[in-house]
Image (cartoon, helix red, strand yellow):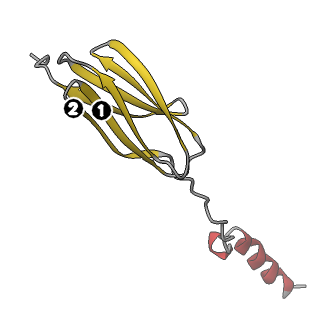
């Protein structure tokens, strides 16, 4: 009985030791990368404003939309259907006057990118 007492005491003390725990190896984390616009540009070609965009990442088939603005005023909307095989889109808007234009790209209603074309010196 006297020989068991030190063993029981050591056993109780080692139960509280943090170094006797062997951690469980966690399961690998599943990473889902978001959909993103990798190439986008807003340029003037004569009287047309042209937005070119490429979408990369895992994507369910849906519409890539553009909303055109001149300053705070909305000029129009357009959309193209994209899927895994067709990831590029190009949009055009007739705009003869020079202004500060903005195009917002949305995929499935989620804003992905905003493009600006500053043609006037409105920052003064």
Residue positioned 69% across, 70% down in the render: 24
User: Whole-percent x and y of residue 112?
Assistant: 43, 36
Residue positioned 21% across, 30% down in the render: 44
In the picture provided, is 109 more to the left or to the right than 14? left
**Viewport quadrant of the N terminus:** bottom right
Q: Is residue 33 above or below residue 99?
A: below
In the picture provided, is 34 more to the left or to the right than 97? right
User: Whole-percent x and y of residue 115?
Assistant: 30, 32
Mark 1: give few (<14), some (14-19) or many (20+) Cα within 10 Å: some
Mark 2: give few (<14), some (14-19) or many (20+) Cα within 10 Å: few
Instruction: Tell me which numbered mark, 1 or 2, is placed earlier along the sequence.
Output: 2
Marks 1 and 2 close (CB-CB < 8 Å): yes
Q: CA distance from mark 1 to mark 2?
A: 7 Å
At numbered mark 2, what does the secondary structure look like: helix, strand or loop? strand
At numbered mark 1, what does the secondary structure look like: helix, strand or loop? strand
Residue positioned 83% across, 80% down in the render: 5
User: Whole-percent x and y of residue 17?
Assistant: 66, 70
Q: Is residue 21 above or below residue 89?
A: below
Mark 2 highlights which residue? Answer: 45
Residue farthest front in this picture: 46
- Residue in the foreground of this view, choosing between 48 and 18: 48
**Viewport quadrant of the C terminus:** top left
Residue positioned 10% across, 19% down in the render: 121
Residue farthest top in this picture: 73
Mark 1 highlights which residue? Answer: 50
């Amino acid at each position: 009985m006297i020989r068991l007492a030190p063993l029981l005491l050591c056993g109780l003390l080692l139960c509280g030791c943090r170094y006797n725990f062997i951690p469980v190896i966690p399961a690998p984390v599943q990473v889902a990368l978001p959909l993103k616009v990798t190439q986008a540009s807003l340029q003037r070609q004569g009287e047309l404003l042209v937005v070119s965009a490429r979408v990369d990442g895992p994507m369910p088939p849906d519409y890539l939309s553009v909303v055109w603005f001149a300053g705070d005023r909305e000029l129009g909307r357009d959309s193209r259907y994209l899927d895994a095989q067709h990831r590029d889109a190009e949009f055009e808007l007739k705009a003869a006057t020079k202004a500060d234009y903005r195009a917002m790209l949305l995929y499935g209603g989620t804003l992905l990118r905003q493009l600006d074309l500053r043609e006037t010196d409105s920052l003064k």
